[in-house]
Amino acid sequence: MTANPDVRYTPEEYLKMERDAACKSEYFNGEIFAMTGASRKHNLIAGSVYSSIYTQLRKRECEAYANDMRVKVPSTGLYTYPDIVVVCSPPLFDDVLSDTLLNPDVIVEVLSQSTEAYDRGDKFQNYRALPSLSEYILVHQDTRHVEHYARQPDSSWRFLEYFKPEDGFQIRSIGCALKLEEIYEKVDMFAC
């Protein structure tokens, strides 16, 4: 992601430009950061995770969004596009256009070399400021590895990792289960 540090924008200016833009951007502290495209592996993994979650939530009140649902962290001012977002309470939006979600329950990010440090560090720090967020899942694309963070009743975060194809895990806050063999089903771990 890149930004022009000499120019500062208000959130309103960002949203006006973003809604007309051909490419997505994040916004934080007055700066706009262009987002890069995703790899084939990234898209296959995100598609598998989304498909599994969507199928499991089909007959429930929850909504799952892939890739294009902007999320705002009101207390920090971050606007970003997670790979997958799930909300099970009535969705709250930033305005009447309903394109900026304020209350995600679960966020999933597929990691790449260029975003891994950000997704695990500053972005997760911002996400933790969302009172609604119960679980944060990081899926590696170059190795079979899932990191699962779950908010505890005392607001601390429990961390679990999964590596084996037969490993599965529960996303308890939304009543879904994922298996690594399904997440990585179409991905050749040794291909570039």
Image: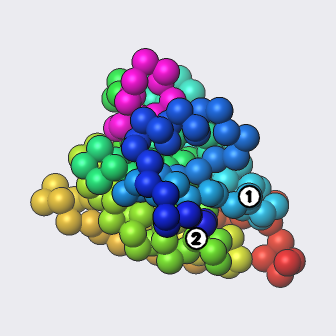
| Residue corresponding to mark 1 | 37
Decide which of 65, 163 is in the foreground and name it: 65
As drawn, which residue projects farthest toward the right? 191
The spot of residue 189 in percent (x, y) is 78, 76
The picture quadrant where one finds residue 154 is bottom left
The residue lying at 18 percent from left, 59 percent from top is 155
User: Image point 41% across, 73% down: which residue?
Assistant: 121
Seen in the image, is 68 located left or right of residue 149? Answer: right
Q: Residue under circle 2?
A: 115
Which quarter of the picture shows residue 182? bottom right
SS for dot 1: loop
What's the distance in space between the residues labelled 2 and 1, CA to CA?
11 Å
Between 26 and 5, the one lying in front of the other is 5
Q: Is residue 106 magenta?
A: no
Q: What stretch of residues is rendered in magenta? A: 93-103
Q: Who is closer to the viewer here, 115 or 186?
A: 115
* Residue at (44, 48) in percent of width and height: 9
User: Residue 126: in sight, yes or no?
Assistant: yes
Q: Position of residue 183 (x, y in %)?
A: 67, 59
Give the position of the N terminus as an image quadrant.
Answer: bottom right
